Amino acid sequence: MTDEELARLRAHDSNISRYRRLLKTKLSDLERRFLERRLSEERSAVESLGPPPPTPRTGAADPVGVL
């Protein structure tokens, strides 16, 4: 994942957190619908960036012997 993609992912994550926090407050129906739509759009944007990179293995011995 490139630096630009990581920056976009962080921005989307920040927006998602903000929208979730705002949805816990008292809102009009219009405001709630707007935030729910934006939250859905942000989640879709995160999914469009693709799956996260695989976690590197630590090199620890495989206890089952599959490796």
Image (tube, helix red, strand yellow):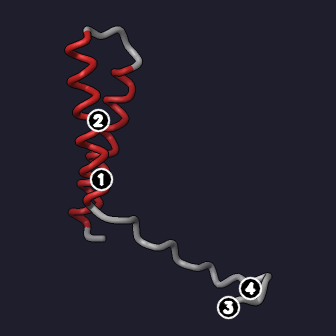
For marks 1 and 2, the one nearer the N-term is 2
Count of marks, rendered view: 4
Which residue is disc 3 drawn over? 67
Residue 21 left/right relative to 5: right
Which residue is disc 1 drawn over? 46
Viewer-nearest of discs 2 and 4: 2
Residue 54 left/right relative to 13: right
Q: Amino acid at mark 3?
A: Leu
Distance of label 4 from label 1 (alpha carbons):
34 Å
Q: Amino acid at mark 4?
A: Ala
Quick check: marks 4 and 1 in contact, CB under 8 Å? Answer: no
Label 3, residues with CA under 10 Å away: few <14, some 14-19, many ≥20: few
Q: Is residue 53 above or below residue 39?
A: below
Label 2, residues with CA under 10 Å away: few <14, some 14-19, many ≥20: many
Which residue is disc 2 drawn over? 39
Q: Give coordinates of residue 8: x percent, y percent.
A: 24, 54
Quadrant (top left/top right/bottom left/bottom right) for the N terminus: bottom left
Quick check: marks 1 and 2 in contact, CB under 8 Å? Answer: no
Q: Amino acid at mark 1?
A: Val
Residue 62 left/right relative to 52: right
Question: Which disc is residue 61 wearing?
Answer: 4
Residue at coordinates 23% horizontally, 41% vertically from top-left?
41
Distance of label 2 from label 4 (alpha carbons):
42 Å
Q: Judging from the image, what secondary structure is the residue with disc 4 in? A: loop
Q: Give coordinates of residue 23: x percent, y percent.
A: 36, 21
Quick check: marks 1 and 3 in contact, CB under 8 Å? Answer: no
Q: Is residue 9 above or below residue 35?
A: below
For marks 2 and 3, the one nearer the N-term is 2
Distance of label 4 from label 3 (alpha carbons):
9 Å
Q: Is residue 66 above or below residue 30?
A: below
